[in-house]
Image (cartoon, helix red, strand yellow):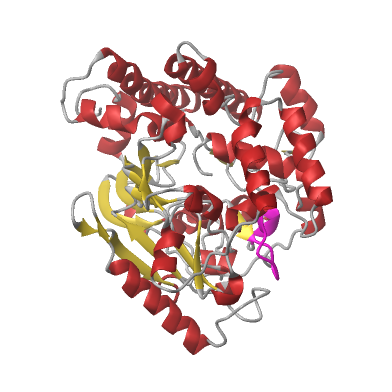
Amino acid sequence: MVNEGRLPNFARALNEGSQASLLSSIPPLTPAAWVTFYMGTNPGRHGAVDFFRRVPGTYRLEPVNAGTVMGTPLWSHASQLGKKVCVYNVPVTYPATPVNGIMISGMDAPSLDERAVYPRAFRDELLAEFPHYTIEPAADVRYLVEHSDDPVGEFTANLQAHLDLQVKVIRSLMKREDWDLFTAVIRSPDAFQHAFWQEAEKAIEGQPLDSGEQQKAEPVFRCYEQLDRELGEIWMQWGEDRNLVLMSDHGFGSLRREVCVNRLLADAGLLTFRKKGARRRTKEFVIDKVGHSISPNLRNTIKNRMRKNSRTGFLFVDALVADVDWSRTRVYSLGQFGCLFTNLQGREPMGTVRSEKERRATISAAKEALSEVIVPEDGLPLMSDFHSRDDTYHGPLLNSVPSGVVVMRNHSYRGIYSTRAELAQEEIYRKPCEDWKELSPTGCHRREGMLMMHGPDIRKANIGTVDMFDIMPTILTLMHLPLPQCCDGRVLQEVFTDSTQLLGENVSIMPDMKQNREAAAYTSEDEEIIRKRLGDLGYL
């Protein structure tokens, strides 16, 4: 788009400032990536890997939020040292934490409740200016494909309306103060590309598009053009005396297939599924099949009755890891991005892996088994890369991160979140979210994202490839602030002009924040909202 002259302001940032390929976290997923950015540490220190995490001592999963991660965020360091900060819509920032300024939580906030905004009094002011404020766009994909005469058009309109809202909120917040640090995330490119990557890619490659494909491709390009205009407005409003960092939490590419990873592990003798009884099959039918055709209130009533009547305390999120015979399982996969966990004795309730030696042997066996999997469609290997825990993560939270991460065709193949859904599949491979029909996702994350920097302290340079955790210490240095000792990243000194005064040594300015877990916990209703949101986004 830059080459075609469609993004003049991004072109200016590229031509006058510094640029790099920005490597995302492993896996390149929203919670892991953004927390790695704002903590300046790897998941072995901060603990965020996926949208859900295992509840310690159980096989139950709970949504990740700011209360489940460790470390001190970028804006907390700046606030502690007297800087005025504004934080808007960054994922994994709920509940909003006290800062010297304003924080509005991102997609992990179930709603704009009193815990989603700091200071709390600002919430009323925000809603007075934006009475229809929403955390995420209203886009119930399953409903649209079944009931709308134009599901693509209505879906696009919803995403566009939310992009317009995000831009207006950012404008309003920027005008309030002469902020020292202003951090905002616009999630719209991610949403458009998940849905319409295939058509956009065809357009990029110069292939002809029919009218239906054009309807899907153009919103992707319009989104970037709108962001480019806003970038120009920011320069007009603020002048050229500000240092600007433009970054993505990951890149994008095609999504071809979804894979039943746990069934592959079962075929290798590393995991065992248990037989399902009539009661569980009934629950699954009601929740999965009937649930989408009845009102939300009735669906919640049915689920609550099931929970109360179940001896095992069946919870909706438990279905993500249901139907596994844990007493005969050594390793299992969670999520869509190939995260493998060993069933560790002393950590999992029915752990079968007894020692560190066994853990290493188990994950090695899983790697070997998955490396031998050939996709029948083309006769080529499924696995394109494998990241072992010992080579990927470090820190005090190693026990909570994956023992290994299998990369399937550079993330063009992804896992299926629910073991229940895996068992329902006749084949190991399926088209992504088939029941979404014309709104089925065609794009998925890649590890290679983008970084652009521009401003009075930034020189023109192409610095190659840098890591996500390098951004936080670089921003602190641009603000002439000392760095915390716990940073995993390095300061990108090669982007600075000669006039920039770099701080010579790291100093520990404050301990890692330890939030009140009870204050950060979700209610069952909150969990349901988060689960539905992630389902609507294609992550469940």
Q: 234 or 118, which is in the foreground?
A: 118
Q: Position of residue 78 (x, y in %)?
A: 62, 52
User: In terms of image quadrants, where is residue 443?
Assistant: top left
Residue 441 vs 400, above or below: the answer is above
User: In terms of image quadrants, where is residue 344?
Assistant: bottom right
Q: Position of residue 237 (x, y in %)?
A: 49, 23
**In this rendering, position of residue 380 left or right of residue 525:** left
Q: Is 62 part of what is drawn in magenta?
A: yes
Q: Position of residue 353 (x, y in %)?
A: 55, 82
Q: Is residue 78 visible?
A: no
Count of numbered circles on the image: 0
Q: 441 or 171, which is in the foreground?
A: 441
Residue at 57% across / 21% down in the picture? 165
Residue at 55% across / 40% down in the picture? 183
Q: Position of residue 350 (x, y in %)?
A: 65, 76
**In this rendering, position of residue 428 left or right of residue 518:** left
**In this rendering, position of residue 455 left or right of residue 97:** left
Residue 158 vs 41, above or below: the answer is above
Q: Residue furthest front?
A: 278
Q: Residue furthest top?
A: 149
Q: Quadrant of the N terminus?
A: top left
Q: 148 or 312, which is in the foreground?
A: 312
Q: Is residue 441 visible?
A: yes
Q: Is 463 part of what is drawn in magenta?
A: no
Q: Magenta span covers which residues?
A: 54-69
